[in-house]
């Protein structure tokens, strides 16, 4: 939690006059309608449909490069390479939690984004003077400039930045992918680039289901206990009648998934579809007991302005007293609408995030008087305890939460 709090302290913000206006949020209009999605890879096309800041089309192929990393060769870092960790996410502040300034910490401090001070595992850009910016902050600065009709500048040196003047810094990206991150299951450290493979396929502590889970076995335990359990599992000896119940539950799940898929296909044929790549920043309420919440800057969609707000454990009084963590979010219409707007929306990870979020589509009817949707769960994958807690904590350890918001407007 301390990482999150520290990010809101002014001392950590770089000297800049560009950021406060948007509240450090990224506003990037990625595509304005279904008919223009085919353009989404062009670099920046103004669609010119106004709406307080304009729906600029910034189809950003920024994500395409990250996949070009070489496969990992080193299985594990030397134990004394670093002791910093934040459950997989390695931010500069998180690295500082180690008592000694180890080499990995000093390196991550040197390599981190000059705007958000994080070292996210996305593309890294640099201005002509060499100041580093992560892909999320870079696109935020560009979108910020565009919304205000000004030239985007480097927050450090004020030199102009654009897609053509700034360049990627592959060395920084490669160095960052070698920095150690901690496995969430066994707590050993691995280079970030091989962490996912380790957690999914190699870790002896990773949570695993019994191979008879399809016929009803609820057992879930660390991988190294699976063989022993399966040898003694009672489920293979159950009767067909007993197995039926499990199969029905299984069918129901498949049916739900199919329904979701069909809904998505339906939505994709709507006339009006917009996605925005957004960045939520942490804030504290000014109540007697400060509560943490997240908010994006305003962004435009369908000629209206919107923000997304999120909170932890639905603003429960002491979220740090429980291990269960959930993030819920709401969509808020900030401008007046005379006609009701029926909006479907959902969050996905987008190009600047490594959040593992599953798909859950929500719907709200925005009217002149009803401008805020309910708070809906941001569905994060199951951790060890069966909730999204570990992924949620990983998100909280970062300086901001980057995600893509897809919105569909039903024409009536
Ligand atoms: Zn950044
Ligand atoms: Zn600069
Ligand atoms: Zn592990
Ligand atoms: Zn079993």
Image (cartoon, helix red, strand yellow):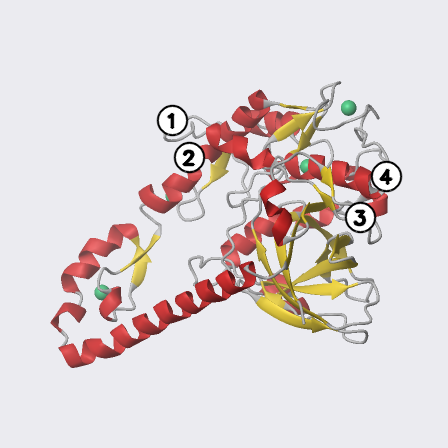
Nearer the observer, 390 or 121: 121
Real-space Cα distance between discs 3 and 4? 10 Å
Instruction: Describe the element under mark 2 as helix, strand or loop.
Output: helix
Q: Quadrant location of ligand 2?
A: top right
Residue designated by label 3: 54
- The tag on residue 74 is 1
Task: Give the mark toward the camera: 3 or 1.
Answer: 3
**Residue sitting at the far top:** 129
Left or right of 390 in this view: 234: left
- Of label 3 and label 4, which has the lower sequence position? 3
Residue 121 x/y as whole percent: 56, 36
- Of label 4 and label 1, which has the lower sequence position? 1
**Dot 1 alpha-carbon crowd within 10 angstroms: few under 14, some 14 to 19, many 20 or more:** few
Residue designated by label 2: 194
Q: Mark 2–mark 3 contact, CB under 8 Å?
A: no
Task: Give the mark toward the camera: 4 or 2.
Answer: 4
Name the image quarter holding residue 145: top right
Q: Mark 2–mark 1 contact, CB under 8 Å?
A: yes
Left or right of 21 in this view: 246: left
Q: Residue at x 47, y 28 (%)?
A: 68
- Of label 4 and label 2, which has the lower sequence position? 4
Asked if 271 appears above or below 84 in the picture, the reply is: below
């Amino acid at each position: 939690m301390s990482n999150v709090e520290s990010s809101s302290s002014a001392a950590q913000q770089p000297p800049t006059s560009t950021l406060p206006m948007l509240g450090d949020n990224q506003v990037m209009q990625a595509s304005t309608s279904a008919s223009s999605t085919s353009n989404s890879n062009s670099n920046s096309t103004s669609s010119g449909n106004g709406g307080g800041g304009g729906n600029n089309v910034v189809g950003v192929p920024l994500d395409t490069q990250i996949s070009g990393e070489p496969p990992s060769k080193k299985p594990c870092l030397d134990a004394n390479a670093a002791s910093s960790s934040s459950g997989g996410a390695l931010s500069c502040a998180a690295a500082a939690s180690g008592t000694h300034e180890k080499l990995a910490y000093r390196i991550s401090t040197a390599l981190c984004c000059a705007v958000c001070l994080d070292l996210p595992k996305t593309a890294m850009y640099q201005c002509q003077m060499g100041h580093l910016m992560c892909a999320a902050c870079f696109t935020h600065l560009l979108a910020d400039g565009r919304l205000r009709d000004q030239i985007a500048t480097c927050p450090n040196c004020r030199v102009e930045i654009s897609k053509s003047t700034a360049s990627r810094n592959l060395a920084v990206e490669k160095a960052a992918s070698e920095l150690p991150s901690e496995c969430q299951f066994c707590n050993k450290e691995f280079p970030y680039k091989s962490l996912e493979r380790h957690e999914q396929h190699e870790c002896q502590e990773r949570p695993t289901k019994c191979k008879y889970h399809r016929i009803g076995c609820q057992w879930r335990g660390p991988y190294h206990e699976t063989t022993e359990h399966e040898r003694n599992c009672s489920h293979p000896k159950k009767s067909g009648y007993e197995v039926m119940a499990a199969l029905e539950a299984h069918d129901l799940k498949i049916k739900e998934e199919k329904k979701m898929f069909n809904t998505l296909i339906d939505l994709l044929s709507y006339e009006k579809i917009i996605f925005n790549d957004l960045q939520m920043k942490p804030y504290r309420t000014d109540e007697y007991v400060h509560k943490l919440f997240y908010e994006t800057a305003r962004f435009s969609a369908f000629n209206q302005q919107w923000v997304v707000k999120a909170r932890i454990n639905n603003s429960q009084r002491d979220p740090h007293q429980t291990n269960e963590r959930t993030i819920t979010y709401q969509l808020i219409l900030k401008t007046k609408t005379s006609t009701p707007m029926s909006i479907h929306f959902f969050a996905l990870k987008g190009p600047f995030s490594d959040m593992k979020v599953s798909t859950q589509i929500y719907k709200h009817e925005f009217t002149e008087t009803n401008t805020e949707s309910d708070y809906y769960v941001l569905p994060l994958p199951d951790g060890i305890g069966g909730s999204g807690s570990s992924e949620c904590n990983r998100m909280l350890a970062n300086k901001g939460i980057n995600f893509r918001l897809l919105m569909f407007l039903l024409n009536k």
